[in-house]
Amino acid sequence: MTAVPETSLRRRFVRLAALNVASNLTVPLAGLADTVMLGQLAEVRFLAGVVLASLIFDYLYFGCAFLRMGTTGLVAQAWGRRDVHEVSAHLYRALLLAAAIGALALALRDPLGNAGFRLLSGTAEVEQAGRAYYDARIWGAPATLANLVFVGWFLGRGEAARALLLVAAANLGNIALNWWFIIHLGWAAHGAGVATALAQWIGAGLGICLATTAAARASWRIVLDRNELRRLVSLSGHLVVRTLLLITAFAVFTNVSALFGTARLAANGLILRILSVASYFVDGAAFAGETLAGMAYGSGNRAELRRVLFLTVAAAELGAACFLLPVLLLPEVIYGLLVDHQEVAALAAASNVWLLPVLAFAALAYAFDGFFLGLTRGRLLSRAMAISLVIGFAPAVWAALHYRQEDLLWIGMTGLMAARAGTLGFAARRTIRPHGEGI
């Protein structure tokens, strides 16, 4: 197959990355809207409650992130092979899986919520606010999971503009609904949950409209092909393990933060919100690399695969550097704008320096993640995450608990990201070398 010229590949990468950045940024902006609006309320328990309750949804939705990640890689590879029918079949398979999981989440909403809050640490008032948020937001589960599939499918086809339209509609709608329910109606944490659920249904409706105009017909025989279903289940299983381990690290970090007091919990929650904004920004490059790596893999073009990896890593680190500069220079201003509680803002500003090492290593890890997701190397990603959690994160968290030292928590987060970057970077080097693993 003829190699794609370097300038053409770079233009495609930049276009995809820019659209992905725009799409990704609407997600944390909606989360920041929750934080800002809840932070303006008289009682900080509403903000702390939403921080805790969000961990349950992190497990549910990020645990199901394979619906987005797996779909992108599989579709990109089929697109690289010019297999139009298989491109559409991947959409229908993933939507069936999303519908089944969404229905199960609604059926088990009470046991899931009860188990989640039993594991989390918070005062009775904080848990009450968190429960109000959870009980409202859970009704958006089927729509949220369907949106993961739609976004993954559009990205796999290289149609980041459609993914942007869907995500922007859902998250800008969330911001508007947050204002209405939290500020205007005074529903506090419950209002934040209602707004998020309704916004996801808006996005799902748009996703159906956009996909209907692009997907080809596919027979049930093709959609339910046993080998392809087995491949999807295997990939999904590894991505579930990988994602749940990552979310476990953030959940442990947040839960241990709560043991240092409500103010520290809220402060670390603010920093994680900032890190979330940065990660979505950096993921614009990772998503572009995921799409183009999958297409290069599907077409068997090793030279293009190497160029995609280089572009992805360079763009991810550049994005991290651009984001870090204002946050490191003006922490008091930024956190002061986000929350109207001086103690919380001061604690967040004091720990803000940890964003530098965490994000520098995280940018590398996200870039390598995108590369291997495009190659659908789920087993590699799950193993690398497990190793990183054990050697990079767990020892520092144990020390934080044992010595009651808050900074050790951030050392653990830095170690997790550094270990992920190291393990995946080593594997990437082996994959792209001339006589490395086959593609």
Image (cartoon, rainbow, N blue to C red):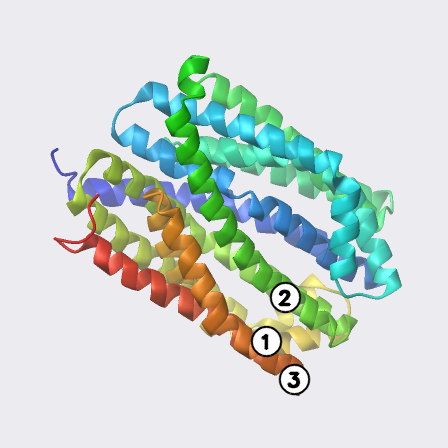
CA distance separating discs 1 and 2: 8 Å
Identify the mark nearer the N-term, 3 or 2. Answer: 2
Q: Is residue 243 visible to us here? A: yes
Residue 117 bears which disc, if any?
none
Please name the amino acid that badge 1 sits on: Val
Q: Do tag 1 and tag 2 residues touch (Cβ < 8 Å)?
A: yes
Q: Position of residue 418 (x, y in %)?
A: 41, 70
- Image quarter where the C terminus lies is top left
Please name the amino acid that badge 2 sits on: Val
- Image quarter where the N terminus lies is top left
Please name the amino acid that badge 3 sits on: His
Q: Quadrant of residue 224?
A: top left
Q: Please give the residue where the numbered disc 3 appears in the rendered image.
A: 402
Residue 397 bears which disc, if any?
1
Q: Please give the residue where the numbered disc 2 appears in the rendered image.
A: 252
**SS at badge 3:** helix
Front residue of 95 and 20: 95
Q: Do tag 3 and tag 2 residues touch (Cβ < 8 Å)?
A: no
Image check: 273 left or right of 281? right
**Mark 2 packing: few (<14 Cα in 10 Å), some, or many (20+)?**
some
Q: Position of residue 382 (x, y in %)?
A: 44, 54
Relative height, residue 194 to residue 392 (above, below) = above
Q: How many numbered marks are there?
A: 3
Q: Position of residue 377 (x, y in %)?
A: 35, 47
**Residue drawn 57% across and 57% down?**
247
Image check: 15 left or right of 243? left
CA distance separating discs 1 and 3: 9 Å
**Residue drawn 55% across and 78% down?**
396
Q: Position of residue 329 (x, y in %)?
A: 52, 74
